[in-house]
Image (tube, helix red, strand yellow):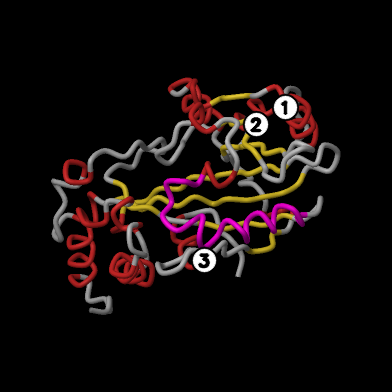
Amino acid sequence: MTLGFSVDALLPRARGGGQLRMGLARLDESEWLQLDPDRAVRAEGFADFPAGVQLAPEAATPGAELAAMLGLAGALPEAAAAHHEDMCLLTRRESEDAYRLVGAAVAWPSDWHPAEKLGRALTALHAPIQGYAEQLAGGVDHFMDRLEPGKIFGRCNWFIAPTVARRWVAQPPELAFAHVDADNAGETLFVRSERQTLRRLPATGAILFTIGVYVEPLGALSDTNVAMLARAVRSLVAGEGDRRGAGAYAAALIGYADGRGLETGS
């Protein structure tokens, strides 16, 4: 099974709850990036969020390498503007063990601010994720060290949001989801999935992290995916459900799934 380019196609590959895991899939070159980006929408996204472009000096050379690899003039911002995916560059200094974020061209962040993350190491980048340091950090570091040029890996995740907007900043859950109930959840809850890929640039050795954002209303998804989400909100690891605001929407989502006659557990 590979990674598709829609919420319905991505969710079967996403973690449904429980312990954190990378959940990587090997991708062919033809599966790396979406083939039909809407460049006008991308330009609008960056115009609305100029703070999404953050560049440390270390991003200049790998950014130029990336743009050239994609047949473009310029560097990281031009590469991201020409594709559906947001793009980040990570490098490791000779004196350090950890990869750090040195460049970001992110039009549609999922509740994070690139300016606050620039220069941070991986564990610090993921600090808001409950359990990352204990369950996943070691495996991620090992994977990054061993990633070879020419190999592409992908994974995906999901969030429940109260908006279809691609650039999403979370609000207090009790306010953001106050209008949601089991009867209207199909139209008022939106499932946001990030299609993430990792590959090493061959000349500079920098690692490129891409994030393709897809958003659909809950009611537009398949029965299988709605049932998975209803089960998942019951079993999120301790603390993660609070970070995702699950307590404010879980009853509505589960009630909506039950109303569709789906098996959601108990």
Give the mark nearest the N terminus, 1 or 2: 1
Mark 1 and mark 2: Cα distance apart in space: 6 Å
Left or right position of 140 against 30: left
Query: Which quadrant of the figure has residue 58?
Result: top right
Amino acid found under the numbered disc labelled 2? Val
Q: In the image, which disc is placed on residue 13?
A: 3
Residue nearest the observer in this picture, 148 or 184 = 148
The magenta stretch is 126-147
- Quarter of the image for the C terminus: give it: bottom left
The x, y position of residue 186, in whole percent, is 24, 57
Q: Residue at x 75, y 34 (%)?
A: 66
The x, y position of residue 174, in whole percent, is 17, 46
**To which residue does mark 2 refer?**
102
Q: Is residue 127 magenta?
A: yes
In the image, farthest residue toward the right: 203
Mark 2: give few (<14), some (14-19) or many (20+) Cα within 10 Å: many
Query: Which quadrant of the figure has residue 152?
Result: bottom right
Do residues under tags 1 and 2 come within 8 Å of each other at their CB atoms?
Answer: yes
Give the mark nearest the N terminus, 3 or 2: 3
Q: In the image, which disc is placed on residue 58?
A: 1
Give the mark nearest the N terminus, 1 or 3: 3
From the viewer's perspective, is residue 34 above or below residue 139? Answer: above
Q: Residue at x 48, y 29 (%)?
A: 116
